Structures are given as C-alpha cells and as structure tokens.
Image: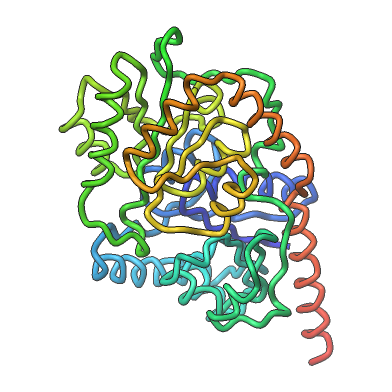
C-alpha cells in the first residue's frame, strides 16, 4: 500500500511519526508532505522526518489563507496526479483532503477539534473515515455532514501517542540555558493565525506575560511561540525578562523541567496534563479535550488573569499537589489505547473494501 501523510503542525509530526514507522516496518510505501511554516519545518528537521514541502501557510488574513490553500491544492495535484497514493491520512488537511477526493484516494481524517469550524466544514464531509477521541460526541461531527457510520473513536487523547512511547521516568535533555535552581513557568502562546481565533492582537497574552513577570520575579518564564511574528513581538516587548526559544523545543523535556505550564492552545496543554505537570488553560474558548481534563482534575481553567496568578501560586507553594496530579495522570494514561493501531487497522479495512469494489466491476 502507498500511503500519503500530510503533516502541517508539530503535533501532527509527533502523532504521525510512529504511524510512518509502523507502515514502513510492514513494507508499505509512505510519502510525507508538509508546507512552509516555521514550526512544521523545524519539527520535521529535528525529528528527521523526510517530508516534501509543498505550498505555504497563508498567515492570519482570510484572503491570504484562501490564496495559499488554492495554490497548495494545485501543487499537491501536480505532485500526485501521475503517481497516486492508495490512501491519505491527515489531521483534516483541507488541501490534501480536496485532492484525495478529486483523485479518488482513500481519505482518513484524524481530528479532536470540532470547534475548528472552518477547517471541519472543508474536510469532514469529504472523509471516508473520521478517527477521533472517544470523548468527542458523534453529533459534534455529524453537523458537518459526515455519516455516523464513517466515524470511529479511539480511547486516547492525541498526546498519548508520543508519551506512551517514552519512559517518562527518564529525564530528557532540554537544551535551553535555564537556571535549575529557580522555579520554571512555561507558557505556550495561542494559535493566533488559526481561523477560529478572533483576536487580532496579543493584548490578553501580553497582559498575562506582564503579570507573570511582576508576580514571579527572578524566576524562569519560558514563552513558546508558534510563529516568527510572535517571536518578534514577544522579544520586542519583553526581551531580557523572559526566555524565548528560537528553535522548537522538546515538549516532554520542557514539561519535565517546568514547575507549572500555562497553555493558550490545546495540544501542549493536554500533553502537560497527561504528564502530570501542573497545568492551567487560558484558552479563550472551550473544547472537549479541555473539559475532560478539567473533569479529571488534571487541568485548571481560571476565568481571568487574576485567577491564573492565584492558581499558579497555589500550585507552586504545594509540592504535594504536583505529586498527586502526576499519580492521577499515570492512572488515566494506563486506561488509554494506541490510536496508531486503530489507524492502521482502518487503513487495511478501507483498502480491502476498495479492492473488492474494483474487482466486482471487472
């Protein structure tokens, strides 16, 4: 089988890397594509994922998103039309999904984000199969036009894929010059170029960073940026007062060294919670993974910046709380299954069905 995997973000690289290995080990051919986008390029290089970079990220403006998406679709069509793969696996890639539909390629979507309405509208109706965490209700997907029979759940949150393949008792090298005698607070900025993010400026993010600097003087405050524009903006306003990695960092290593994590997005917040690192969500919206983690006592979601500061101080002054969260996280991870196995099985089922259909036509 020739399988096409489209990787657009660091999360997707970490999630799909074991799938690439599993497929290659059993003799399948795997073609990996990505796009020109800071974090996607950095993670593929760091993880040594052999990806073909086709097209680019359109940025924040809707017109630029549309233009970049149309151009990428055209380039993907040109790349694959003379040598079609049998199947596509992606995290709801609009361009890859459209090309797969047009060329008659099996299309498997993976997603835990029905709140990403724009992307879901463009991708979910075209999927031959949607794979999603068990905590996301089917009705959250059927509103986009997919049949219930095409939805399959796996009992895991997505970061479990890479966390389950690491010995979390082992300390991983971070590669950042951090004073280990100080408390370390890590903050992940929001995906400000995503269509579901409405803010045009970094007002609430910068207000939070300023308060963290004021309240936790002389401590390590690590700001993880997604885009070059975020790096430039943070350095311009806070240079010398926070640590801003230029390169992509190993999330597991950073979270091991962090006494507290504050997330304005989804993936790394879930990763921190599943590792048992005290975690706070300051994401402006709400989503199913976040609600699940809050219900299990692995994540706290304050209403405002004052709440973030109050909860942060509580976490940092009570080391017993961190130990309890870590034990709770371990128990929850123990009850999860490997989504990679589910994807491989579904690929085989869909491929057999397609071959049988082709044989019946002859």
- Left or right relative to 201: residue 317: right
Q: Residue furthest top?
A: 181
Please tell me which residue is depicted at 66% across the width and 36% down the height of the picture.
Answer: 163
Nearer to the camera, 177 or 179 = 179
Please tell me which residue is depicted at 46% across the width and 45% down the height of the picture.
Answer: 301
User: Which quadrant: the N terminus?
Assistant: bottom right
Q: Position of residue 11 (x, y in %)?
A: 52, 47
Nearer to the camera, 207 or 28 = 207
- Left or right relative to 66: residue 351: right
Q: Position of residue 308 (x, y in %)?
A: 38, 37
Q: Position of residue 222 (x, y in %)?
A: 36, 27
User: Which quadrant: the C terminus?
Assistant: bottom right
Q: Residue furthest left?
A: 236
Q: Position of residue 346 (x, y in %)?
A: 76, 65
Position of residue 20 relative to residue 280, above or below, is: below
Position of residue 247 relative to residue 13, above or below, is: above
Q: Residue furthest bottom?
A: 361
Q: Which quadrant of the structure image shows residue 211? A: top left
Looking at the rendered structure, the number of numbered marks drawn on it comes to 0
Nearer to the camera, 282 or 115 = 282
Please tell me which residue is depicted at 31% across the width and 71% down the height of the picture.
Answer: 66
Coloring scheme used: rainbow
């Amino acid at each position: 089988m020739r399988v096409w995997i489209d990787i657009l973000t660091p999360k997707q690289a970490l999630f799909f890397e074991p799938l690439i290995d599993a497929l290659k080990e059993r003799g399948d051919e795997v073609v990996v594509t990505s796009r020109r986008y800071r974090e996607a390029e950095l993670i593929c290089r760091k993880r040594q994922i052999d990806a073909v970079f086709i097209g680019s990220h359109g940025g924040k403006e809707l017109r630029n998103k549309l233009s970049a998406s149309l151009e990428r679709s055209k380039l993907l069509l040109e790349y694959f039309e003379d040598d079609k793969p049998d199947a596509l696996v992606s995290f709801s890639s609009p361009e890859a999904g459209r090309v797969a539909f047009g060329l008659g390629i099996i299309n498997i979507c993976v997603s835990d984000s029905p709140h990403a309405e724009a992307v879901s509208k463009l991708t979910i109706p075209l999927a031959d199969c949607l794979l999603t965490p068990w905590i996301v209700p089917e009705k959250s997907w059927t509103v986009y036009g997919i049949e219930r029979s095409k939805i399959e759940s796996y009992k895991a949150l997505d970061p479990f894929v890479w966390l389950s393949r690491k010995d979390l008792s082992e300390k991983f090298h971070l590669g950042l010059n951090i004073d280990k005698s100080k408390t370390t607070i890590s903050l992940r900025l929001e995906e400000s170029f995503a269509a579901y993010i409405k803010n045009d400026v970094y007002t609430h993010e910068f207000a939070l960073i300023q308060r963290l600097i004021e309240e936790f003087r002389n401590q390590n405050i690590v700001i993880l940026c997604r885009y070059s524009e975020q790096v430039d903006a943070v350095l311009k306003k806070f240079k010398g007062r926070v640590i801003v990695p230029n390169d992509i960092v190993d999330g597991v290593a950073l979270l091991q060294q962090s006494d507290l994590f504050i997330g304005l997005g989804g993936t790394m917040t879930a990763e921190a919670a599943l590792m048992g690192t005290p975690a706070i969500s300051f994401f402006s919206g709400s989503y199913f993974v976040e609600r699940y983690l809050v219900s299990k006592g692995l994540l706290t979601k304050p209403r405002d910046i004052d709440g973030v500061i109050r909860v942060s101080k509580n976490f940092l002054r009570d080391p017993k709380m961190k130990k309890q969260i870590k034990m709770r996280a371990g128990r929850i991870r123990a009850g999860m299954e490997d989504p990679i196995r589910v994807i491989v099985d579904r690929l085989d089922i869909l491929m057999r069905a397609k071959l049988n259909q082709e044989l019946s036509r002859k």
